[in-house]
Image: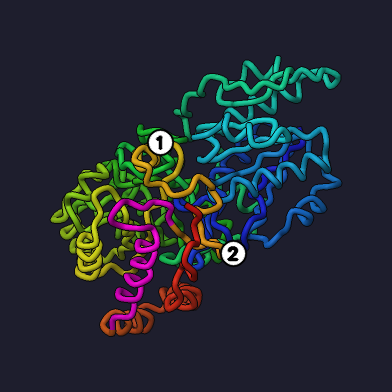
């Protein structure tokens, strides 16, 4: 089939595949990574695919349609997110208007949590591929391309495709059984090959990473059960399924040979360090093959031992991105973080000793949060003093334990998914408990960023870092240029930004 894979237009530089999708204050823009993995899998199956990332390219819906008009796609795959879902559907409707016979399919964490509810929003959307959708899309495209062109009863043939919701011949919404997760991840083509074929890598940026960067995964799923984390709960499960070390090393070498300007590789597994033995084996293999010559970073838990850190540093590991979330132990326990404050403190100390930078993520408004625990978290962040830090209000997404918890208490103040962001597309919150309104959470995050980043000692350390380590200078300057535009501005500029 001729297939359009689209990260749809929404807000400029909208980072749809971020764990908390938004227009970020640091300028961070994620690759449409999961969509790209599916593109590689579809091409491997013989389909003719065109991939467009509209937010990164600055394209409008009209520009997207002009770009694919001569291609005449028979199937469209649209990535989605909770805050953008109504806009994503509108793009799908416009594609259907221009290409009446196109089969419009939605993918992503939001529609995985609410497949039938999403289909009910528009009769122009033909299907939803929920869960881990690579194999689902290949089977769906195969079934659609094989069916008789004169047969309009698409629902009759789609009933066999696991992992989809769709409309049958009578227009009724059906949801098929879920598809098992992919076990052999080595069978999926390198995502970096898809980037090289379809994307300009320069718009993609992480505030904590060197630029330009390539983002990939070495495994899917997370063995931990944090109440807020959306990807394991909606798409990829709690079993950590891993690529072989040989496959990872080969992709590192491919990136080294085909992206000469790349300054960093970011490993976007939910938790690379969940398997520390594998981390050590990977580190040794990268050193042995020369794959360590490009610096790399990874998402980590705050429980890596010093010896493993040293091996990872030798293999090129530059930075850990870690969700610390709170400085209050009771709050950490409430969200099933399965970590202690003492272990977090030791982890940061050891990372600095090993020469690995730390980007710390702090989320406020969790279960049991109070004004006192907010201040405790800010003090803890300053004591840890990671290289960079982000503070953001809790974002509860459909399909997560937190969405059920806060919704069950009546503390989600809007059912309109547009309100998950401010009008400018910045992180907001729709969670207000009896003691803490969402406006107070957002205001605290604004203040916490100022208090953390405007410390004289921190600013001096950043200047020193740029002088002593010029490789970090570009990253620091680029992030600061975007970030400081927001630093003194409130995220919610007027009262009543969220309709209750």
Q: In 3D space, how far apart are the residues under numbered discs 2 and 1 (Cα atoms)?
A: 29 Å
Q: Which residue is found at the position 79% from the left and 53% from the top?
A: 67
**Residue 430 point in image, percent of width and height:** 43, 52
The residue under the point 52% across, 61% down is: 422
Q: Secondary structure at mark 1?
A: helix
| Residue 214 visible, this orientation | no
Please name the residue that numbered disc 2 is placed on. 203
Q: Position of residue 433 (x, y in %)?
A: 32, 51
Residue under pointer 1:
233
Question: Position of 270 compared to 125: left or right?
Answer: left
Left or right of 336 on screen, residue 113:
right
Q: Mark 1 or mark 2, which is nearer the start of the sequence? A: 2
Say if 219 sits above or below 192 in the image.
Answer: above
Q: Is residue 439 magenta?
A: yes
In the image, the segment drawn in magenta is 429-455
Residue farthest toward the left in the current orientation of the protein: 342
Image position of 352 (left or right of 62): left
Dividing the picture into quarters, in which one does residue 98 lie? top right
Position of 143 relative to 121 (above/below): above
Between marks 2 and 1 in the image, the one whose residue lies nearer the viewer = 1
Image coordinates for residue 365, horizontal then vertical, percent: 32, 54
Graded by Cα atoms within 10 Å as few (under 14), some (14 to 19) or many (20 or more), the crowding at tag 2 reads some
Q: Is residue 415 visible?
A: yes
């Amino acid at each position: 089939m001729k297939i359009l894979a689209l990260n749809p237009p929404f807000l400029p530089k909208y980072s749809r595949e971020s764990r908390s999708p938004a227009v970020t204050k640091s300028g961070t823009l994620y690759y449409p990574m999961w969509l790209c993995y599916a593109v590689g899998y579809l091409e491997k199956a013989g389909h003719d695919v065109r991939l467009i990332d509209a937010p990164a390219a600055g394209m409008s819906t009209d520009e997207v349609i002009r770009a694919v008009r001569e291609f005449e796609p028979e199937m469209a795959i649209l990535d989605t997110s909770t805050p953008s879902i109504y806009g994503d559907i509108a793009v799908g409707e416009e594609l259907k208007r221009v290409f009446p016979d196109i089969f419009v399919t939605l993918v992503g964490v939001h529609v995985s949590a609410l497949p039938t509810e999403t289909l009910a929003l528009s009769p122009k959307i033909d299907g939803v591929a929920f869960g881990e959708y690579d194999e689902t899309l290949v089977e769906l495209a195969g079934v659609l391309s094989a069916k008789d062109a004169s047969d309009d009863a698409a629902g009759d043939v789609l009933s066999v495709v696991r992992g989809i919701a769709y409309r049958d011949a009578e227009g009724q919404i059906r949801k098929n059984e879920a598809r098992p997760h992919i076990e052999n991840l080595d069978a999926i083509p390198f995502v970096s090959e898809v980037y090289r074929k379809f994307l300009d890598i320069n718009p993609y940026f992480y505030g904590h990473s060197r630029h330009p960067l390539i983002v990939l995964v070495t495994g899917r799923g997370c063995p931990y059960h944090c109440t807020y984390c959306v990807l394991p709960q909606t798409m990829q499960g709690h079993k950590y399924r891993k690529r072989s070390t040989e496959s990872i090393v080969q992709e590192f070498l491919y990136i080294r040979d085909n992206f000469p300007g790349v300054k960093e590789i970011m490993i976007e597994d939910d938790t690379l360090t969940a398997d520390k033995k594998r981390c050590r084996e990977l580190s040794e293999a990268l050193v042995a093959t020369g794959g360590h010559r490009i610096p790399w970073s990874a998402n980590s838990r705050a429980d890596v031992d010093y010896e493993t850190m040293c091996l990872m540093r030798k293999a090129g590991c530059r930075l850990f991105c870690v969700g610390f979330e709170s400085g209050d132990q009771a709050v950490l326990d409430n969200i099933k973080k399965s970590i202690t404050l003492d272990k977090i403190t030791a982890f940061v100390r050891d990372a600095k000793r090993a020469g690995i930078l730390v980007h710390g993520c702090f989320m406020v408004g969790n279960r049991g949060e109070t004004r006192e625990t907010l201040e405790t978290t800010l003090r803890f962040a300053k004591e840890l003093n990671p290289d960079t830090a982000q503070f953001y209000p809790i974002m509860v997404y459909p399909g997560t334990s937190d969405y059920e918890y806060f919704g069950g208490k009546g503390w989600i103040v809007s059912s309109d998914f547009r309100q998950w962001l401010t009008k400018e597309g910045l992180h907001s919150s729709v969670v207000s408990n009896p003691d803490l309104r969402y406006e107070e959470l957002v205001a605290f995050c604004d203040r916490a960023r100022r208090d953390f980043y405007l410390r004289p000692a921190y600013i001096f350390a950043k200047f020193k870092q740029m002088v002593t380590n010029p490789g970090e200078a570009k990253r620091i300057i680029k992030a600061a240029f975007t970030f400081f535009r927001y630093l003194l501005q409130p995220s919610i500029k007027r009262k009543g930004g969220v309709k209750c």
